[in-house]
Structure formats: C-alpha cells, structure tokens
Image (cartoon, rainbow, N blue to C red):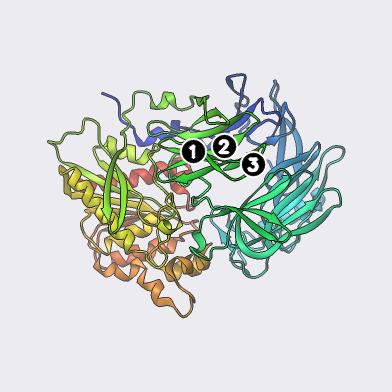
Amino acid sequence: MNSAIEINDMLGYRFPENLQYSPDGTRLGFQVAYADKEKNDYRRDVYLSCNNQVIQLTHTLDAALVCWQDQTHMILQRSTEKDEPGTTVLYTLNVNGGEAEPWIVLPFEMQTMTKVSDGVYAALGIIRREDPDAYLDSAEKRREKNEARAKEADYQVVDEVPYWFNGRNFINGQRTALFIIRTDKLLKIKRVTGPTFDVSAMKVSDHDVCYTGISWTGYSSMIYQKIFAYHMDSGRNEIIYGRADHTISGLFVIKNRLYCLATDTKQYGINESAKLYLVTKDGLVLKKDPERSLYNSAAVDMALGSGRSSAVSGNSFITLASDEDRSEIWKYNSSFEKEVLFSRPGAVFFLDVSDSRIAFAYMSPASLMEVYEMDHDGRNVRKITSLNEAVLKGKYIAKPNRIDYVSGNEKLHGWVLLPQKFSKNKKYPAILDIHGGPRTIYSEAFFHEMQVWCAKGYVVCFTNIRGSDGRGDAFADIRDQYGSVDFENLMDFTDAVLKKYPNINQKKLCETGGSYGGFMTNWIIGHTDRFCCAASQRSISNWISEAFMSDIGMPFSSDQCGVSSAFRDTEKFWNHSPLKYADRVKTPTLFIHSDQDRRCPLPEGMQMMQALSIRGIETRMVIFHGENHELSRSGKPEHRIRRLQEITDWFDRHTA
C-alpha cells in the first residue's frame, strides 16, 4: 500500500520557472524555486540544460534568471536585505564555470529586461509620478529620499484610482516606465516614456522597442492600451496604434512585422478572448480568431513564478492555449493556420523556443511540474528534469475519474478523485471544490490539496461549469448571470456524482472554493443547506463594496454584473451579492482571507462572516497578515500549510 500525501509534503516540492534558450539555442536556462523552511519563504537556484545534461549552476546565491547576455553568460537578479531601496542588483554568470559576479546596479526597481543588441538593453521599471527622474539622483540624494520616505511610513496618501494592486499593495503615483540601458562603456540609463505613462508590455523588434500602455492621471480603468515604438537609431517615440479601444495582451514579431493579441471587449465584455492582429499604421488587421485563450488557464495550487506564454521561431508563432480541460501548445504558421503540437491531460505552464526545439513546463495528473523538450513538429517529446520524482515516490496519487452530465442545455463533465482502496461497501464523506476566475479551467493536473483530502478518506469532485474557460467566449460569458446558471450546473454535477457513487454519505458533503469559487461558496450557502460545512476563501460577498474597493473593481464588477451605472443601477449589484441572502444560511462556514488581498478585499469576507455570526450560524474566520490574493498559490510556505490545515480541520470536525 502506498503512503499518503500529507499537507507538509509541499515543503519538498520543486517549481521550475522562466525557461530561456541561449541566443544560439544550444543551452536552456531556467530557475527552480523551493521552500526555505527557516526563513518561511522561497529560494531560487539557476539550472542549465545542455548536451542532454541538466546541471545546477547556483547553490547559495538565491537568484533569478533575467536574460542571456551572450552565448555563455546569463544575467541574474538577486535581492538581499543589504540592497538599497529602489535599486536592482544584477549579476553575470559564466555557464562554463565560476561564481556569479556583480555586474551593474540599476537605480530603479526593475520588472523585466530584454537584450536589444550587444551592450544595449530595454527594461521596464517603477518610477514615481511626482519624481520620474529619481533614477538620475546621486547615491547621497537617493539615501536622503529613502530616509524621508521612511519617516512617512506610517501614512498613506491616495489621490488616484487604482491606488493599490494585488501583489504590489499601494501603487498610488507609481508608473511602469521604459528604460534604455547601455553598458558597453560607462553605464548609461535613459527613461523614454513620460512621467504619467504606464507601460504594460514590450517587445524588441530588430533595433526598435515596441511597447503598449497609456498615459493617465486621476483614474485609469487599466483596460485599453495604445501601441508605440521607440526607435533606437533616432531616439524618438512613435505612435503605432493610437486608439485606446482594445485590450492588448501581447506583442510579437514575424518577418519584421508587428502583431498583437487584442480584443475590443464589445461582444463578450472584459473577459473576451484576444484575437491575432497585424499592427499597421491604418489600424489593426484581424488575422485569426483562435476562439480560445492563448495562455494557460488551468488552476493548480503547486506552481510558482512565471515564464513566457508564447514565442516566435522563424515564421511560426508558438503559444500556449487553453482548450476544453487542458492547456496545450499550438503553432500558427505565416498564414495563421493552426497545428496542435502538444496535448495531454494536465497543464502546460510556460515555454521557450529555439531554432529546432521547444522547451516547456508540464504537469500531468500523476506528477508535479517538470521541464520537457520536443521538436518543432511536436515529436520526440522527452522529460529533461526529475525535480519531484523523489518527493512523490511511493505516494498514493488518486487518478481523475471523469463524469459526464447534462445541466440545462449544456453537456458538461467533471472528475472524481477516490481514496486509496475505495470500497463500494463503505460510506465516504465528499468535498466539492470550485475553481476561481470564473474564466479558469480545472484540468486533470496534479492538485495538492485535493490529493491531501483523498489521502484522508474524502471523495473529491470538481468540474468546469458555464463561465469556465476552454470552450469559447459564448460558454464563458455569464455576465449578469452570476448565481443562476453556474449554481444550477454545480448542483447538477453534485447530483451526478452522488448517482455515480451512491456510497457517498450525503449528510457529509463539504464544499470550498476561492476567488470566484469563494463567491460561489457564499452563494451556495445562501441557496441550499445540502452541505454539512463550507470553506469560503478570498471571496466576494457584496458586489457594491467590491466595485468600489477592489483593484479591478469598477470595470470588472460592472461588466460581470451587467451594470451600466454603478451609482444608479445598484439593484443588479445587490441581486448578485451573496450577502443579500445571508439571512437564509444554515451551513457552518469557515472564511479564509488575507489582509493585503486587493482583488477581493478583506471586508468581502468580513461582511459575510459577520452576517452569519449575528444569526448564530457557526462560523470562523482566519486572516493571514501580509498575504494577498495568491495565498494558496504563492503565499509563504507556513501560511499555505496553515491555510490548508484550517480547511481540512474544519471538514474533519463537521464530518466526524
């Protein structure tokens, strides 16, 4: 009999991130994150794959790969407590041997950096609206400003919206600027965007730097962007597409022609899928409607960091795509004809492309994330890392058992995970787990919390309902339908599970979900008492307060609730709010929230918890200090363990 997966096993998991081929494509660099138990944080080591061997390049540096400097040197970023606030320390590492060496210190907080040519780089970094040229300050002047800010640490002034953003906390007055960095002789840095301009993405095209963004003061919905180019030869900016009427989520270049992923949001709202456009001076020319999200939508709880969702090789655009219940790798040729290169149960998280190979990080139903490579035609797939084989060896991993069901007019499916040695002659408690989004998908990829619950004897079930990604915009569009068709789908799925597995104890059904899943948890307990207990995580309870508090509040909340005016049409907000129905709740409910969650702010959980408490409904709230909306995915290791332990204990107590 295999041993059980336990909550603390996550401390031994390894997370590959940020795959990048060297300029000649012969070497693949990436980093691996893992929990640091003593510091209750994460560390990162840099790895190299070359000549069919994978070696660890750093062991004690705790650094992240920025980009390749040349064929044999990487640029790394490292942060320590000794670093001066508002600066970024970069190192170079010779992959043929030796220690990482200090390279340059950038006088701003760098977000990303890309090589333009030898000794020339484009970088995105944080500036302050009222002091955009602080990067030119002397070291003494910078220290004076940091000391002055330290004296103001007890105060926060806001005079624009959004004034905070999840994961970054207060951003009032901050903008993301484009910098050109020259390192060939003396270090020279030049900011090339305005004090109020906010860059959202950039792409190097030949010797030009193309970028998207918009200038704003006072209020920005942060939905639509324009497209620009900074010409390295002339040192001037040019407007390439000057109408702020599209959400632009990415840029890429084929044959020196600029393309973008964009949507005008007119048909399906703020969550509408991006289409592929050619960018011209006369406008955006539609080349392809993929009818799917060209990124990974799969929800998992054991992935850290990030990487590229797409890359160009020759005349091909290679990208992640979320289709049905998995994320895949697609290739578009110069005529934008699609070929599926990789499609297996589970999820692909990021990729990079050389002239002959594609590297990607993939998580299967029975394994954590590992790095793979394959040819450009999708053949010769091979796993090149074994980062997590040891930690899962000998463990029981429940396989997803598919259930097809019909709800309304939709043919849907979900999965059930069964405990080890599942017996039809024994009664089992069960857990319904609901994903966030709502435009996300559950795949068959390994999900730690679900495996933990299976190991403790629970049947765990999950599904993709209306509103989920993977089946096109029409299926995902539930604007002004929150709490109706989605609730019906979930209840029909629960019925289908109980019919398939009649030995589930119907008096011991538990339910949980986070973000949109937290909203649905709050909604469910106000509309049925079929669950013996529930755990609501980072939830929404009141669309009115959410609209006026969240970092994406007004655009997102109004769009999703079908509200034309947040000041006059509050009835729709309230009708879609779980708080309106809190007087009906009978279900004991645990609330999990973080005090720096700016996506679903803390008062959303507090309102619902108090509404239950004053009615005498059993409830408990656990607030995680210093965490944000990503607690379950990238929170501090001990906090993630405590979160999962709280939920598990709640279920155990109410199913005992």
Residue type (three-letter) at the residue carrying disc 1: Val
- Neighbours of disc 1 within 10 Å: few (<14), some (14-19), many (20+): many
- Tell me what residue is drawn at x 23 percent, y 37 percent: 457
Q: Residue at x 33, y 41 (%)?
A: 450
* Above or below 32: residue 256: below
- Which residue does the numbered mark 3 point to in the structure image? 81
The alpha-carbon separation of the residues under discs 1 and 3 comes to: 34 Å
- The relative height of residue 393 versus residue 467 in the rendered view (above or below) is above
Residue 351: image tag:
2
User: Where does residue 40 sit, x and y in percent of width and height?
Assistant: 49, 39
Secondary structure under tag 1 reads: strand
Q: Nearer the viewer, residue 513 or 356?
A: 356
Amino acid type at circle 3 is: Glu
The tag on residue 653 is none
**472 or 47: which is nearer to us?**
472
> Of 303 and 39, which appears nearest the observer?
303
Query: In the drawing, does residue 156 fall left or right of residue 237?
Result: left
Residue 37 visible (yes or no): no
Circles 1 and 2: CB distance less than 8 Å?
A: yes
Q: Is residue 316 left or right of residue 495?
A: right
Left or right position of 344 against 172: left
Mark 2 or mark 3, earlier in chain: 3
The reply to whether residue 236 is visible in this rendering is yes
Give how far across and how far down residue 101 sits, in percent: 73, 30
Q: CA distance from mark 1 to mark 2?
A: 8 Å
Give above or below for 284 relative to 431.
Answer: below
- The residue wearing badge 1 is 348
Helix, strand or loop under label 2: strand
Q: Mark 2 to mark 3: distance in Å?
A: 32 Å
